[in-house]
Amino acid sequence: MRIGAMFDVGQSVDQVVEQVGGLRQAGIEAAWTSQIFGYDALTLLAVVGREVPDIDLGTAVVPTYPRHPLMLAAQALTVQAATGERLILGIGLSHKTVIENVFGQSFEQPARHMREYLSILMPLLRGEQVSFAGETLKSSTWAPLSIHAQAPPVLVAALGTTMLGLAGRYASGTVTWMTGPKTIEAHTIPTITAAAAEAGRPAPRIGVGLPVCVTRDVDDARERAAKVFAIYGQLPSYRAMLDREGAAGPPDVAIIGDEAHVSSRIRDLAAIGATDFCGAPFGTDDEVRATVAALGGLVGS
């Protein structure tokens, strides 16, 4: 299982570069960033990748609605060209409240949107010309994109059965968030794997994203997790996964404890078939440092 960590984007670009350099020095194999209301994730990864070698760079995730797939394909291939082809392109629908209220777009047909989005995006990334007309998206290019880079792996943020099916049939795999191990084993992996096999595609990558804290004070860390990650217990898609897991809230799926406990929980994810771990370190500065060190210690174990 490839070990990765989310990095903090609430700081200057120079500080981000320094932080990702620290992840690399710790032995971590992939540095991940979200795309919410801060830096443009792909632009930031292009900058970071020019400064920090020998670590994969992932988005978890870039929302699809605000970017036409032609533009996203060009951005992703540009990052590939700039970084020596180290990008892992995670994409997702985002959420109804964000797409409708922030971007003013319709969220009426999310599954159709994603199917049509991938129908345009994937051929463009492979260096093909596209002519596609769907209900939600259209694209007719005159020629392939003239960017000299290989297609990155595309991981779709998929939680429910329909989206997992799309990820298995069209993409390289999935990257989840706030989805616990029982759900990953009983729902996520079998659903996406069956869809990929039915489509004649290789076994999909299974990325698991969870908060992580190496700490001596588990109760206090759980209280902090409940506050920091409270929104994810309220958004419908994540709430559904927490309910499926039997979790009251984010602290119940977060990986919190001493180094031995945290390492054991992450190894358990590898044992059930996860191929990528995307840990989100949280806590005090000392706890974050301990968490990063623990994640780095898992590489190759």
Image (tube, rainbow, N blue to C red):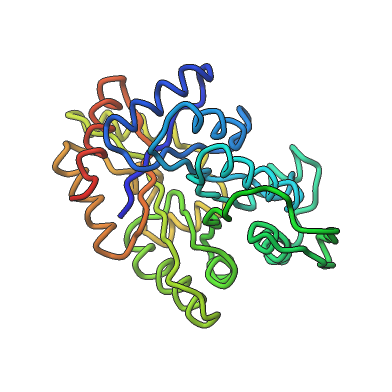
Residue 265 in the image, given as x and y percentages of width and height: 23, 50
Closer to us: 291 or 301 = 301
The quadrant of the picture occupied by the N terminus is bottom left
Query: What's the residue at 53%, 20% (across, down)?
Result: 13
Closer to us: 167 or 17 = 17
Locate residue 136 relative to residue 192 in the image: left or right.
right
User: Residue 8 sits in which quadrant?
Assistant: top left
Query: What's the residue at 31%, 35% (across, down)?
Result: 222
Closer to us: 120 or 290 = 120
Residue 275 in the image, given as x and y percentages of width and height: 35, 58
Residue occupying the far left of the picture: 260
Query: What's the residue at 76%, 59% (across, down)?
Result: 108
Closer to us: 102 or 57 = 57
Residue 79 in the image, given as x and y percentages of width and height: 59, 40
Locate residue 70 relative to residue 40 in the image: left or right.
right
User: Residue 262 sits in which quadrant?
Assistant: top left
Locate residue 43 relative to residue 116 in the image: left or right.
left
> Is 120 placed above or below 47 here?
below
Residue 97 in the image, given as x and y percentages of width and height: 69, 44
